[in-house]
Image: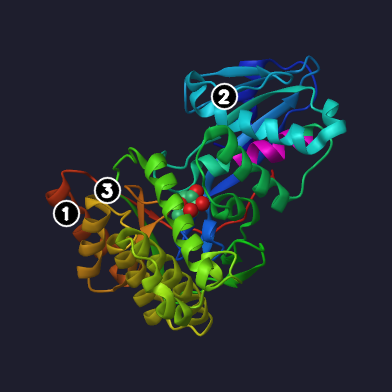
Amino acid sequence: MEKQALLQEFHERFGREGAQARVFFTPGRVNLIGEYTDFNGGHVFPASLSVGTWAVARPRRDGIYHFQSTNFDLTAQTEVSSIVYKKEDDWVNYPKGVLAELLELAGDEAAVYTGADILFHGNIPNGAGLSSSASIEVLTGMALSELAGCPVDKIELAKLSQRAENKFVGVNCGIMDQFAVAMGKAQHAIMLKCDTLDYRYVPVELDGYTIVITNTNKRRGLADSKYNERRAECESGLAILQQSMPGIETLGDVTYENWQMYKDTITDETVQKRVNHVISENTRVLKATDALKKQDIALFGELMKQSHESLRDLFEVTGKELDVLYEEACKVDGCIGTRMTGAGFGGCNVSVVKNEAVARFQEEVAKHYEERTGLVPEFYLCDISDGAKEI
Ligand code: GLA
């Protein structure tokens, strides 16, 4: 939707009275490599997309926040003095959680949050693992802090959005998604170390290749509880390794060589597999960003494939649909790298495909995926765009 059309929709819903409404945008993201490394203090390599979420927002003076969306019928409101999680508020729990964090951050200055009308509109496929929730969170943080006249810097917005998701929504996610959608840069991916938040932008120049995102169109059922379970397994693995290596604070601190030396101290086979994935994946991110800088796209693609296999066999978060997409993508001549992206259990795959093979890739993958799963996939050509901004 264009800015003018969004404003018009806002005025029809909330009237024209009051201050000038402002419009903000936050993208979705795709992670090129580095899965389940973020909450383990490792590296990730995401990029922000051109699809995303818009918000039209205007301040009120009565302490009430009204939330509406063009995508969902459900609307909800909250008083600034009593923000509570309500299951029936569904998607509105994301902006409410962020508002609660904004108030906490503002401390003695919290009185600047006087209420607002806010209309959301998004075009990120829902539940596809392209960070539609992180997009709403960071967007809310930017819009409401701007309206209150106390803008919060983008890294702080990412951090408070993650806290909202952890504490308010109850998913123990890492920082990757919120950081990527806040800080994204057109034509670049972000090499981020997730414990220190040191980051650098790496140009994504894939001469002759296209990044294709394929949606399994499988809804991510039970994903949140499995996600929290994986996180707990990683934490128990870390606690065991710390007995031999007291200096480590996260799994991201463990080199592959040290892992080889101490892996047998973890006797639980499942926990050992989870940790094996995290440590090898972290090494792959470093190799992959290096390969990209040297324009070694073949190596980059190979590392993507290794990443998928590790997520399938060791971390066990792929599932039938993502594995079928992976297998069918690997068979297409001209597809040089492919893997699941995001939390898994459904959602999307990301592939690097030679430009001249993109049409054939879509045709062949769609045909065989549908035959094998009964589901129709969707394809999006990845367009790496800027992070959160006012428009
Ligand atoms: C989800 C989470 C992220 C990250 C990925 C897996 O997208 O929100 O924090 O853990 O899964 O890499």
Q: Is residue 327 above or below residue 97?
A: below
- Label 3, secondary structure: give it: loop
Compute the Cα span from label 1 to label 2.
43 Å
Highlighted magenta segment, given as a residue range = 137-146
Q: Is mark 1 within 8 Å of ligand 1?
A: no
Using the image, tell me which numbered label, if any, was put on residue 367: 1
The quarter holding residue 10 reads top right
Q: Is residue 132 above or below residue 49?
A: above
- Residue type at mark 2 is Tyr
For label 3, the residue is: 377
For numbered disc 1, what is the local secondary structure? helix
Q: Which residue is identified by label 2?
A: 85
Image quadrant in which the C terminus is located: top right
Q: Which quarter of the rendering shows the N terminus?
A: top right
Q: According to the image, what is the colour scheme of the structure?
A: rainbow
Residue 139 part of the magenta segment: yes
Q: Main secondary structure of the magenta part?
A: helix
- What amino acid type is highlighted by mark number 3? Pro
Q: Are marks 1 and 2 in contact (CB under 8 Å)?
A: no
Magenta highlight on residue 25? no
Query: Which mark is first along the chain, 3 or 2?
Result: 2
Looking at the image, tell me whether mark 1 or mark 3 is earlier in sequence order: 1
**Alpha-carbon span between mark 1 and mark 3:** 9 Å
**Amino acid at the residue labelled 1:** Lys
Q: Position of residue 159 (x, y in %)?
A: 66, 48
